[in-house]
Image: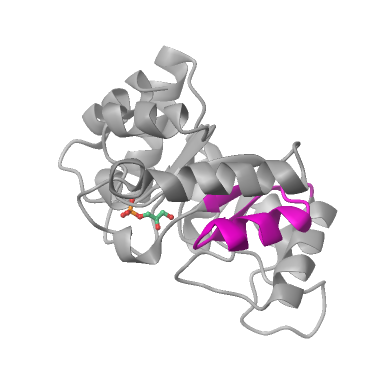
Amino acid sequence: MILVNLKAYPCDPVEIAEACATVADDTGARVAVAPQAAHLSAVADTGVETWAQHVSPVEHGSHTGSTLAEAVADAGATGTLINHSENRLKLADIDASLAAAGRAGLETVVCANNPAQSGAAAALGPDAVAVEPPELIGGDVSVATADPAIVEDSVAAVEAVDADVDLFCGAGVSTGEDVTAAGELGATGVLLASGVAKADDPEAVLRDLVSGL
Ligand SMILES: O=C(CO)COP(=O)(O)O
């Protein structure tokens, strides 16, 4: 799977979503987009698989400023990131956000910095854990090249806790070669942002990324 996190980059979320949908349709590859919460409906309307960047550890109620899991599902999201490196949560809140996502029927990827956190995240029962070394996020060198051991060790840590949880990796992923390298280390998906969100031609980048699956 290729999961494109648009963060808060100044890109056109619908243009990128349309490119992802086209590439997914043409190739049969699984490509999803995680835009800003306010753009979820517009992105979902393109037909692309749509993910939230975060859901709050809350239920319906007096939670001003929260991102309610049920609301992102209503807007068309079918999955959510939780605990991204740029939006870290306490352990209890990761657990409660997973519960919220579960109530709303959302697939879940919990992000982690390192193998120990990957194992701990797996213990909470997400669909997948995504290991992203913070120092490599937004850089030019892929995690699979710069620090292959962190991916292999995270695969092992997750497998030891719950073999049903997938391991994704991210940080610096921008080419098909990076995707292939991640797969060779045992990752079943990649999480990336700047390689697509900052690209002059996102569709060309996506076609290259998908070629590495
Ligand atoms: O944080 C990331 C995806 O969630 C990785 O970002 P980059 O692909 O820009 O390194």
The image quadrant where one finds ligand 1 is bottom left
* Side of 149 relative to 106 (left or right): left
Q: Is residue 99 magenta?
A: no
> Residue at position x 73%, y 45% from top?
160
Task: Name the colouring of the figure.
Answer: one colour
User: From what the image shows, is residue 62 above or below residue 32?
Assistant: below
Residues 151 and 112: in front is 151
Residue 58 lies in quadrant: bottom right
> Residue at position x 67%, y 47% from top?
158
Rendered-image quadrant of the C terminus: top left
Residue 183 lies in quadrant: top left
Q: Position of residue 85 (x, y in %)?
A: 47, 67
Q: Position of residue 118 (x, y in %)?
A: 61, 56
Region in magenta: 105-130
* Side of 93 relative to 67 (left or right): right
Q: Is residue 114 magenta?
A: yes
User: From what the image shows, is residue 164 above or below residue 98?
Assistant: above
Q: Position of residue 128 (x, y in %)?
A: 64, 45
